[in-house]
Amino acid sequence: MNGLMMNQPLLIKSIIEFCDKVNPDVEIVSVTADNPRHRYTYRDAFARSRQLANVIAGWGLQQGDRIATLAWNDYRHFEAYYGVCASGYVCHTINPRLFPEQVEYIINHAEDQWIFIDRDFLPLAEGVAASCPTVKGWVVMTDREHMPDTSLDNVFCYEELLEGMSDQFDWPELDENAACALCYTSGTTGNPKGVLYSHRSTIIHAYASVMPDLLGLSCQDVVLPIVPMFHVNAWGNPYACPMVGAKLVFPGSKMGDGAELTRLINEEGVTMSAGVPTVWLGLLAHLRDTGESIESLKRIIVGGAACPPSLMHAMDEQGVETRIGWGMTEMSPLGSVNSLTPAVAALPTEERDRMRLKAGRPVFGVEMKITDDKGNELPWDGVAFGSLKVRGPWICSNYYKLDGSDAHAEEGWFETGDVATIDQHGYMAITDRTKDVIKSGGEWISSIEVENAAVGHPLVAEAAVIGRFHPKWSERPLLIIVRDKGGEHLTAPEVLQFMEGKIAKWWMPEAVEFIDAIPHTATGKIQKTELREIFKDFEFQ
Ligand code: AMP
């Protein structure tokens, strides 16, 4: 017997319709290339999304066609998210930090029809446009006064297109499983792979993300998504905030600018923010150099890469709670968030800090398991390392136009490519990427824990560990370090001495090398393939 409940489809247009009625006066503040502090309300934003929908309707596209964005986090990008998705097209957010060849590849793979673009990315677009035959036109996200010169064909000005357009639009009644957004993962090897989100997955993910132990969002919050809107839909913030009526503050191109971020936090009263560790390290350096503080900020979500303990402690000193989150483009992205259960909060400081550094407990809606090489499930004892697999309604069931990926080899599960432990309290800790694991004498070493121990040294700016051949142990860890300001004379023995007692004895690096900069991927992750290439001739003495 079925329940007698309405079968209302979960659609992005319902966020617009709800927010327009319930939270219309809540503000969206943005830094843009043509305005250092643009502000308006959700009511204004959605009226302009409807104007945009009328513009798009004139382009003669088919439902499901891809319309791309090459843009920073700001209000026009927000309008495009809603205008494109709610009218039944797929919003493909292109990561401008990818190599031009990759950008060209994904535009062609997605068969993008139109591209909304910020001025900053015109040189990138000009370089690839001739090789992207599906693109019918480009819309520069600015006003007439700021329209730049460009060699692109079929270029339009965003504000000119909107001018005079009706702000009434009947959003189509779509199937909730219809695609709404597309984001390519920037793997370190091979071509990027497309993750195609649906209306249903996006709404359920946004719903889950606001739970108190996750992002914990409410109408009291002012949210600064520093994580780019081209990196897994800014972790769902642009959907979650209008759902609860939280004020949104978009940093535009200033996401790496500690001074501007501090100003935005203090002047707009930001309470919650989300970003990768690099962003927070930049902000903390600014606070350290200037003595400024960030009083209104209550908590941050740190994800996308391992969070160094020093970051968490520095945030503690600022009175900001750090919640580590783990996820992937393939997971919309939320998989786990670390908030303390009463039992863990009551642990002695050192033990509690160790727990806080884990990737957290699974979000309801994400099932997890860890398995050994043969696919056998491993215990949740905090000790066994295994390949981390997940399933749930906001996890990709396949990649776009790519049948049967290895990641989906086990029926019904997605193999994350991460290696993890899960303890008896359900706290998961990422120890490595599968491709980066170091096996010393047949036993796995967690490179993330070794890196965290090294980064704790006050004169270490960044650390990475890779495995190198060792005649006795087959592999041993090589620690690669970028010295921080003032650390010019830091030596290998000093670093190793500092790390003693912080990790298992046999995890201690066999050698330490210093380097000027560690290579990163387009989403800010350490590029270990390149490090292995740089140190391919390295031999332990
Ligand atoms: P992306 O799809 O670009 O968001 O990258 C996802 C990958 O980032 C994951 O598979 C992890 O390897 C890594 N990652 C994300 N969050 C964390 C975290 N909290 N700790 C360690 N690695 C993380």
Image (cartoon, helix red, strand yellow):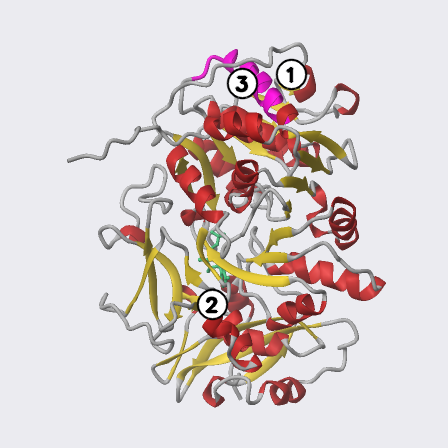
Give the image location of residue 157, x and y in percent: 68, 20
Q: Which residue is situated farthest in the left direction here?
A: 1
Percent x, y for residue 280? Answer: 66, 59
Classify mark 2 as within 8 Å of ligand 1 or not, answering yes or no: no
Amino acid identity at mark 3:
Ala
Q: Are marks 2 and 3 in contact (CB under 8 Å)?
A: no
Determine contact: label 1, label 3, CB under 8 Å: no
- Magenta segment, which residues? 45-61
Image quarter in which the N terminus is found: top left
The amino acid marked with disc number 2 is Thr
In the image, what residue type sits under mark 1?
Answer: Leu
Compare marks 2 and 1 and give the one earlier in the sequence: 1
Judged by its main secondary structure, the magenta piece is helix
Q: Which mark is residue 162?
A: 1
In primary-sequence order, the first of circles 2 and 3 is: 3
Rounded to the nearest angstrom, the CA distance separating label 2 from label 3 is 45 Å
Residue lying at 63% horizontally and 51% vertically, measured from the top left: 273
Of 31 and 41, the residue lying toward us: 41
Q: Residue at x 69, y 65 (%)?
A: 319
List the residue tagged with mark 3. 53
Element type at mark 2: loop
- Percent of width and height locating residue 113: 49, 23
Label 1 sits on a secondary structure element that is helix
Q: Is 388 displayed left or right of 232 in the figure?
A: left
**Residue 47 belongs to magenta span:** yes
- From mark 1 to mark 3, how far is it between C-alphas? 9 Å
Q: Which residue is mark 2?
A: 341
| Residue 182 at least partly seen | yes
